[in-house]
Image: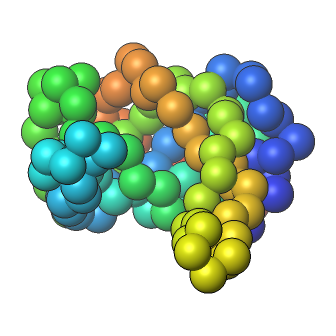
Amino acid sequence: MRRELATREGERKKFRAVFSRIGKKTNYKGYREDTILLNDVREVETNHLVADHLWFSYTKSFEKILLTEGTWIEFEARVKEYTKGHVNKRYHIDKRKTDYKLSHPTKIKIVENQREIHPIQ
């Protein structure tokens, strides 16, 4: 699904997505950190689905808007490559692979016009 993002690596674009829920993760320093799950992530210009879901850190920019389940939001973000998977040096296991994400979300706002999100075709 994220192959669409691979073709746009390094570009900063405007996206729309549906807020699903808040989650938690352990960051690289071992502390718990809040995250948010966005579903149905689409590029605004073309309305193409670029990812079925993406996780973001629950930053102050997201905290400023009132997010409830099913809320459509619009934001700008940069497409970046990252490595996911795990490595076990002891047993010579390397299950890493490259994937793509959206990073540094800015200009986050709630979108209220549903017709604008899914135009009738």
Which corner quadrant holds the N terminus? bottom right
Furthest-right residue in this view: 7
Q: Position of residue 121 (x, y in %)?
A: 74, 60
Residue visible at 13% across and 51% down in the picture: 32
Q: Is residue 49 visible?
A: no
Q: Is residue 103 left or right of residue 68?
A: right
Q: Nearer the viewer, residue 87 or 57?
A: 87
Q: Position of residue 96 (x, y in %)?
A: 68, 64
Q: Is residue 53 above or below residue 8?
A: below
User: Residue at point 60% right, 59% down?
Assistant: 84
Query: In front here: 95 or 42?
Result: 95
Residue 72, image x, y percentages: 35, 48
Task: Locate residue 98 relative to residue 28 in the image: left or right.
Answer: right
Asked where in the image residue 101 lies, by quadrant, the reply is: top right
Q: Nearer the viewer, residue 89 or 44?
A: 89
- Rendered location of residue 53, percent (x, y): 50, 63
Q: Residue at x 34, y 58 (%)?
A: 37
Is residue 77 rendered to the left or right of residue 67? Answer: right
Q: Residue furthest front?
A: 90
Is residue 96 placed above or below 72 in the rendered structure?
below
Q: Tell me which colouring the rendered structure shows.
A: rainbow
